[in-house]
């Protein structure tokens, strides 16, 4: 299965990449399993996971099953860091 992960703004700068494509030898995984494939991303966001906007094919994982959200083939995951301003 192919999963595309896009990260944005200062998160991309912190990680040193903005897009990763993963090929996983399963038909279905959880978002947590996808994160575990990318240790740099896991280590950066896991302690403050609720502060990030994480979309799976445009749907917030908070509206799905959070870390246990099921991921199938040809999915795009977009991760936006907390934004400040004013």
Image (spheres, rainbow, N blue to C red):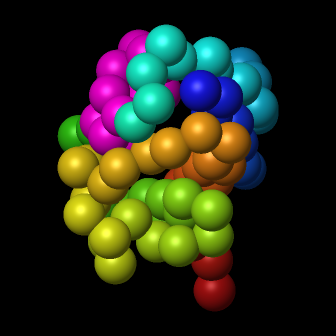
Residue 50 placement (x, y as % from top left): 29, 61
Q: Quadrant of the N terminus?
A: top right
| Residue 14 higher or lower than 68, as above or below | above
Whether residue 21 appears in magenta in the rendering, the answer is no
- Residue 84 or residue 26, whichever sits in front: 26
- Residue 12 or residue 74, whichever sits in front: 74
Whether residue 43 appears in magenta in the rendering, the answer is yes
Residue 41 left/right relative to 18: left
Name the image quarter holding residue 21: top right
Q: In which quarter of the image is the C terminus?
A: bottom right
Residue 54 placement (x, y as % from top left): 49, 59
Residue 17 placement (x, y as % from top left): 74, 24
Residue at 54%, 62% (x, y): give it. Answer: 55
Q: Give the range drawn in magenta.
A: 29-44
Task: Residue lying at the far bottom in this picture: please name it.
Answer: 86
Name the magenta segment's main secondary structure: helix
């Amino acid at each position: 299965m192919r999963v595309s992960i896009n990260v944005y703004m200062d998160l991309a700068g912190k990680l040193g990449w903005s897009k990763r494509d993963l090929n996983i030898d399963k038909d279905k995984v959880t978002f947590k399993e996808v994160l575990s494939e990318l240790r740099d991303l896991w280590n950066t966001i896991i302690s403050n996971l609720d502060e990030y906007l994480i979309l799976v094919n445009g749907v917030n994982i908070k509206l799905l099953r959070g870390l246990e959200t099921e991921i199938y083939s040809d999915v795009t995951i977009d991760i936006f860091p907390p934004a400040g301003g004013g």
